[in-house]
Image (tube, rainbow, N blue to C red):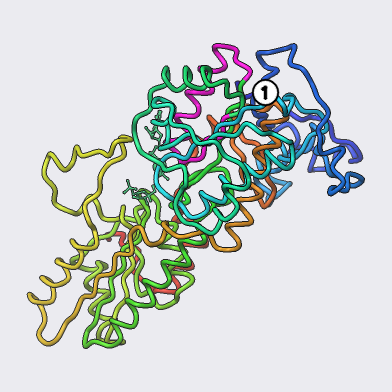
Amino acid sequence: MTSRETINNSPGKPENHPINRLLPSLNLHTPPHLKDYIPKLPSFSNPLIHNPLYDLSHEFFISPHEVVLKKILFDYSGENSAGDLYTCAGPRTDICFDPKNVKAAIVTCGGLCPGLNTVIRELVVGLWDLYGVREIFGVMSGYRGFCTCELLRLNPKTGHDWHKRGGTVLQTSRGGFDLERIVHSIEANGFNQVYIIGGDGTMRGAVKIYNEVCRRKLNISIAGIPKTVDNDVGIIDRSFGFQTAVEIAQQAINAAHVEAESAVNGIGLVKLMGRSTGHIALHATLSSRDVDCCLIPENDFYLEGKGGLFEFLDQRLKDNGHFVLVVAEGAGQNLIPRTEEQKEERDESGNPVFLDVGNWLKSELKSWWARDHKGLFTVKYIDPTYMIRAVPANATDNLYCTLLAHSSIHGAMAGFTGFVTGPINGHYAYIPVDEVARAKNLVNTRDHKWAWVRSVTNQPDFVKS
Ligand SMILES: Nc1ncnc2c1ncn2[C@@H]1O[C@H](COP(=O)(O)OP(=O)(O)OP(=O)(O)O)[C@@H](O)[C@H]1O
Ligand SMILES: O=P(O)(O)OC[C@H]1O[C@](O)(CO)[C@@H](O)[C@@H]1O
Ligand SMILES: [Mg+2]
């Protein structure tokens, strides 16, 4: 349902200006709208027009033509250097739901992430205060809650302090996705706005729900809110809770550094979350500056021989007497010996189950030292695991969650559906959910950030010569 229009008018520029060459290559990624399949959708005035708290005189409402440019830095003299435009998020003058008739459902799926409770709280407060919606329900325990019909009635009073709490008051789960039962439950309960908060797996589920709702031509808006502590969701700038997680990860690295420095040939080994992406490890490394080597899933490494980890570590121990090693949980999985059964292991959502790279590294380090060295040697392994994600959001993430939730409400009220809300270059946008479900945000080991890690740590590139 994603429509891509080509923009080809260029007001105010001389015909031969080089920037004109960009215009044919701009793609507008419009989120689906209920009108796509319900042509006679009613229209209502946005109640914010009568809200005395808002100054409507200056660019308050978003026009249908306001867009956010994905790639804001480009060379306009080059070929194919322009890019993608996304619909600007925010309130519209006309909305497609009468707030009196809105019945909203909110669900959280997948792993925890700091800020989940803030998003839930702000969805409730925003629906209630901005639009006057009174029928708001939490669906308990992820997608499974639609099937069991476990609902929790929500209002701003019940959720007033949720932004101060880690976790999700609605509980979450993996697996249990049953499309038929979910859409049946949405219809049977009379929900006409469904807010789905989750990561890449959740968004793949949201695409299926949206497609089925669309096929049945139901007047129901499906709104996705991207959540993942790993920061692996593509297109958007970053996911909420990520900064909080990086902050907490610092504490683990600090402790590892203190332990390593205080021992003879001390190694401080920290394993951080990051299933298939090393964003947390990378950002924590860059912020800390105490890290000697950072291992991420996007950059293969090896232990023995020239250019390997042990050679580097040996030299650092000789130079500094200690070593801090940060490893993302998804790194080195191809190096750890495993049984056929372990290779096949999946969690309830179908995600591969990892072996503990930290424990494996610890044991490899000890064997290496015993084999090739004499004298004292200590490895202190710190695995903060869930501690970095089971905390309340920090101030920045709390604000982000609030804007995200309110932008999402404005989008659903305006009749958008099958969309995800997220910041693109600092501006909130509505992105087709199928694009978000496909886009993966990996660490680009060829960009300046990874180069910066290499220059801070001086670690090898692990490319075998
Ligand atoms: N391809 C898919 N189709 C339908 N549902 C899916 C799909 N992939 C995952 N899901 C469902 O989405 C929910 C969450 O998925 P998953 O456990 O992979 O977490 P996630 O949303 O990726 O979040 P995170 O990885 O940040 O923890 C689960 O209920 C799972 O069954
Ligand atoms: O919550 P679970 O099922 O233990 O899964 C943990 C995984 O969830 C995440 O926190 C988010 O995907 C990963 O970093 C981690 O591998
Ligand atoms: Mg995921």
460 and 341: which is toward the camera: 341
- Verify whether residue 195 appears in magenta: yes
Relative placement, left or right, of 103 versus 382 is: right
- For residue 78, what is the image quadrant? top right
**Tag count:** 1
User: Is residue 230 placed above or below 134 in the rendered structure?
Assistant: below
Relative placement, left or right, of 426 versus 393 is: right
Secondary structure of the residue carrying tag 1 is loop
Q: Mark 1 points at which residue?
A: 33
Q: Position of residue 134 (x, y in %)?
A: 66, 34
Relative placement, left or right, of 130 versus 193 is: right
**What amino acid type should be assigned to the residue bearing mark 1?**
His
Q: Give the range drawn in magenta.
A: 194-219
At 55% from the left and 34% from the top, the residue drawn is: 137
At 22% from the left and 71% from the top, the residue drawn is: 310
User: Is residue 415 placed above or below 367 in the rendered structure?
Assistant: above
Q: Where is residue 353 in the image (x, y as percent from the top left)?
A: 25, 44
Q: Quadrant of the N terminus?
A: top right
- Verify whether residue 26 appears in magenta: no
Q: Where is residue 98 in the image (x, y as percent from the top left)?
A: 74, 25
At 29% from the left and 78% from the top, the residue drawn is: 323
The local crowd at label 1, few if under 14, some if 14 to 19, many if 20 or more residues have their Cα within 10 Å, is: many
Q: Is the magenta stretch mostly helix, strand or loop?
A: helix
437 and 168: which is toward the camera: 168
Q: Quadrant of the C terminus?
A: bottom left
At 31% from the left and 56% from the top, the residue drawn is: 329
User: Is residue 253 placed above or below 208 in the rendered structure?
Assistant: below
Q: Where is residue 46 in the image (x, y as percent from the top left)?
A: 81, 32
Outermost residue to the left: 371
User: Is residue 52 placed above or below 141 in the rendered structure?
Assistant: below
